[in-house]
Amino acid sequence: MINRFLSFEWKQFSRSSYFKKGIAIKIVMAFAVLYFGGMALLLGVGLYFILKKAMPEIDPMTTVNNYVLYWFLFDFMLRYFMQQLPVMNVKPLMSIPVKRNTIIYYLLGKTTLSFFNILPLIIVVPFSTVLLVQGYPVIQVVAWLISFVAITLSLNFINFLVNKNNLVFYTVLVLVATFGALEHFAIFKISEPAGYAFNYLYNTPYLVILPIVILVGLFYATFKYIKKGFYLDDAISKKVKEVSGSDLSWLNRFGAVAPFLKNDIKLIVRNARPRQVMMMSFMFLFYGLIFYTQETYRDMPAILAFASMFITGGFLMTFGQHVPSWDSEYYKLLMSQNIPYKTYLESKWYLMVAAVLLSFILSTPYIYFGWDIFGMIAAGAVFNIGLNSYLTLFGGALNRVPVELNVKAKAFSNTNGFNPTQLLIGLPKFLLPMLIFYVPYKLISFNAGLIALALVGVLGIVLKPYIFKLIEGVYQKGKYKTIAAFSEKQ
Amino acid sequence: MIKTVNLTKVYNEVSVLHIESIDIPKGQSFGLVGNNGAGKTTYFSLLLDLIQPSSGYIENNGILVHESEDWKPFTSSFIDESFLIGYLTAEEYFYFIGDLRHQSKADVDALLAQFEDFFNGEILKQKKYLRDLSKGNQKKAGIVAALIGNPEVIILDEPFANLDPTTQIRLKQIIKDLAQTKGVTVLISSHDLMHVTDVCERIVVLEKGEVVKDLETSPATLKELEAHFSGEKIV
């Protein structure tokens, strides 16, 4: 039976839609995989030497053990957001005579082969190899490696268990934030006891039994959990929540656009995928912290312009790139109803503009880094409204991948919004602002760069009716193709 | 009201629809029957400009469907679940359609009140999203939504499928009323010969994309249709 399952799996993989997408996307995907794999591998090989160089007085192994906790937490969060559990695929198997246990073992086995479990291996195995070559004790290194893998897999199963439980997730989030802050301000260093524990684990190899026991325990807990829920009306079929209609009539002041705006807000609030995108776009607000805090970027304002663009543009880019895919599930309705394309697109535009403005307001704490930086964010916001919003809508017209609204995105297993056209359309969004800023900055002054950015944005806002006509034309032209693509079952 | 002229649809060099001419006058209830793959849904999709004709055209009230969008204000339809917005409750969905068709909330409420029987207490005030309703109830919501805003042309694909017997009977009454008393042109397709003959004044049989029969409904129609479809199977 397992063989049969494996062959299904292979078919699902090799017949999935992104393999039919032509050679270009395959190359891009291959590059992405090679790139991430390569980076991980390089990190794995280089980690020892990097740490040795950075902190010559401390044993790199100790450093790794001190901070490995953060890696696990990061890993866990990433999983929570991105890793999709293969529960749904089981539905057709439930009514045929296959032993439940077989299916469950298979399912659990399958989750262990996830990208999230393989990536750490690509880092840790070379790292351990380097350790061995450097003459570290074999038993200790091997035991450590096994512990690491066991903990990674444990996270895999924990994720399985808590996936439906927001409470657990937010608890973890708050814990990480708290300990991160405490650590940063040197009040209480959680990494010390944790580091001690991991070092102890490393120094006493027979303790490897501990993570293994935990792993086995979690495996059986998950097994039981799935077995208990192995009925259509439990985990697999959706839970029907009671809902109350929300009154959004205050939006009526937007006139013809109002019905769509109301719909879009409900779309975001009530569906898993848009909610996920929303969270992601919130993260973009912190993008500046990476760049503004580092001295190296201080003298590279073009890079800072790039970062500033992201702070206010998170929602615009993550949500906007899936217009009109968000409405793919009922696109036929929209196309046969009494709707001009223009109002439909305008509603999305207003939404993106509102998000940029909101992000801009939320970004005021960046004043801490100086008015120059804040001016840059402001100019970036204007540019986002006046140009990037159009580019995003324009790119959306060429993006005909249907989106399943109430299903979370999987990492690396769907290519929603990831295609060469999207990539090409995406490039100007980052490169243009850098260029528009850099030329006047180099020739005249910093402020001239900002003004240039803002001016381009204002120009875009002024030309809106004209630009919208262009975008509408593109949408109109692709109408039949889009309908056809959206009605294809995934 | 609806004129179809030399309409063809070709996919990968295979012709899936070829209709030389169908003329549907205003206020007619028009039924389309045919086996799977006969081209019923293709025809309706062409009517709604969801796909492009390979040649020929459809005129809806004098408007070329694939060239102008002006037929949209007086035409409404329910083809399949992709005409529903899954994350809305039934009421929200009705009001949304109402907004699009310039109907006030009160207008929509008044219309919905007429369908209380039809809904059978399973649609309104359910506090459920449309995606969580059963197939049959989704269909009920979709069909009623297609009646919002006094459309002159209503297109329903397989309206009877998935409905319970009581609802089927009620729906038949609704469709008859629309055509006879309100002068609405109703186009439906169905696999159920009995229902179509009950409801439609005219029945067209499609086979492999071509019109093979075009009947005025009479007491003999059902027999004729049954003979046609069973004959096909045996020969």
Image: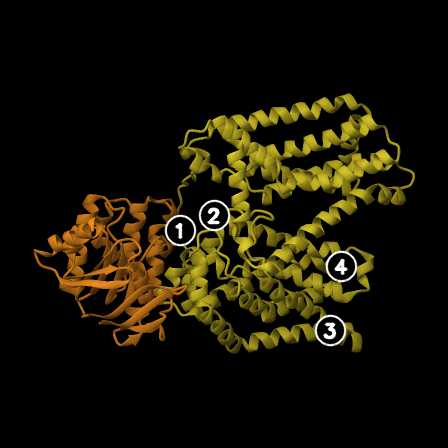
Residue sitting farthest toward the right: A57
Instruction: Please name the residue that numbered disc 3 is placed on.
Output: A449
Label 2 CA crowd tier, 10 Å (few <14, some 14–19, many 20+): some
* Tally of numbered discs: 4
Check if mark 3 and mark 1 are on a common chain. Answer: no
- Residue A358 visible in the snapshot: no
Could you tell which of marks 2 and 4 lies nearer the N-terminus?
4
Q: Colour of chain A?
A: yellow
Look at mark 4 in the image and give the residue it sits on. A369
Is residue B96 or residue A213 the one in the foreground? A213
Disc 3/disc 4 C-alpha distance (Å)? 18 Å
Q: Which of the pair B164/B209 is nearer the observer?
A: B209
Q: Amino acid at mark 1?
A: Gly
Observer-nearest residue: B85 or A2? A2
Residue sitting farthest toward the left: B219
Residue B10 vertical placement versus A134 (above, below): below
Label 2 lies in what chain? A
Quarter occupied by the N terminus of chain B: bottom left
Query: Distance from label 3 to label 1 (Cα)?
Result: 47 Å
Nearest-to-viewer mark from 3 and 1: 1
- Residue type marked 2: Asn
Identified at 49% across, 72% down, the residue is A474
Q: CA distance from mark 1 to mark 4?
A: 45 Å
Determine which residue is flagged by label 2. A406
Query: Which colour denotes chain B?
Result: orange
* Residue contact between numbered discs 1 and 2, judged by CB atoms under 8 Å: yes
Q: Which chain is home to disc 1?
A: B
Q: Position of residue A338 (x, y in %)?
A: 35, 67
Task: Give, as a three-letter code, the residue at label 3.
Answer: Gly
Instruction: Kindly identify which numbered label has been placed on residue B86.
Output: 1
